[in-house]
Amino acid sequence: MSFALFLLLLLVVTGLVWLVDKYFLRNQRSTAAKQPWWVEYSISFFPVILVVFVLRSFLVEPFKIPSGSMIPTLLIGDFILVNKYTYGIRIPVVNLKVVELGSPRRGDVMVFRYPADPSLDYIKRVVGLPGDRLEYRDKALAVNGVPVPRRQTGDYESRERLQYFPRYLEAFDGREHEIILEKEAPGFVGRGMDFRHSENCDYNSGGLVCTVPAGHYFVMGDNRDNSSDSRVWGFVPDENIVGKAFFIWLNLNELGRFGTFR
């Protein structure tokens, strides 16, 4: 059971108890009689659960980064906040969009439900929009025939692997972000599994070429050679989108990272 569904069930149960007590049970008790413990707890927790449910479902939701696929932008152990309404208001649990407020842009860091297993949340960077023709050859990215601007800015020190990797600044529509590449890693990409609309992608020894289908997005990790992303498991459908990541609020290993993500 997902946490969102668990929270919704708690909200419904405590809300029903509050309503039943307000309009029925309260009138049956004498003035001196105490509320049953289950009524007292339900009434006490209902407003708290309601506030948490509304905040988490429609405004912001916290997540923890579990892997290094978004290094150097996001590190393992980063606690981040995700904007839930930037890409539209959705019905909780079923994730059905009911109000259109915006769409993902190239360069956005997006949280979504993993297409192969929607019970898992993934986070990657959007690099391809619906209708885009995306090429990734010899570790160079191009969108609609135009190479994505990229310039090397030095090296990134991996504390986990005790190595240095080239660090680059990549830009979409003038918005820059960092990526890292490994010189020793192969430039070609192999399809890891069959996926929906896999016929839209052509894999070869140099890399891949994909045309993003309508209502879908192509995402990649900033740690390009250590990321399982759309190159491996395909496109992200719009109905799987959770929100846009925008803020680091805690990292117990590096307290100075507070507020460093935008």
Image: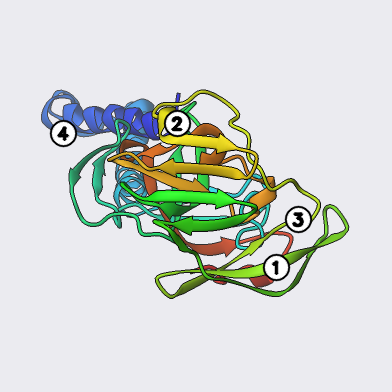
Q: Label 2 near label 1: C-beta < 8 Å?
A: no
First along the sequence among labels 3 and 4: 4
Q: Which mark is residue 22?
A: 4
Q: Earlier in the sequence, mark 1 or mark 3?
A: 1
Please state which of residues 204 and 189 is positioned toward the viewer in this rendering. Answer: 204
Q: Mark 3 and 4 residues: CB-CB less than 8 Å, in contact?
A: no
Earlier-in-chain disc, 1 versus 2: 2
In the rendered structure, the answer to whether residue 42 lies left or right of residue 174 reads left
Residue closer to the observer: 164 or 231? 231
Residue toward you, 105 or 87: 105
Q: Amino acid at mark 2?
A: Pro
Quote the CA–CA distance across marks 2 and 4: 44 Å
Label 2 belongs to which residue? 115
The residue positioned 11% from the left and 30% from the top of the image is 23
| Image spot of residue 156 (x, y percent) | 76, 67
* Viewer-nearest of discs 3 and 4: 3
Q: Who comes first in sequence, dot 2 or dot 4?
A: 4
Residue kind at label 4, given as amino acid type: Lys
Please determine whether, in this image, residue 214 is positioned above or below residue 156: above
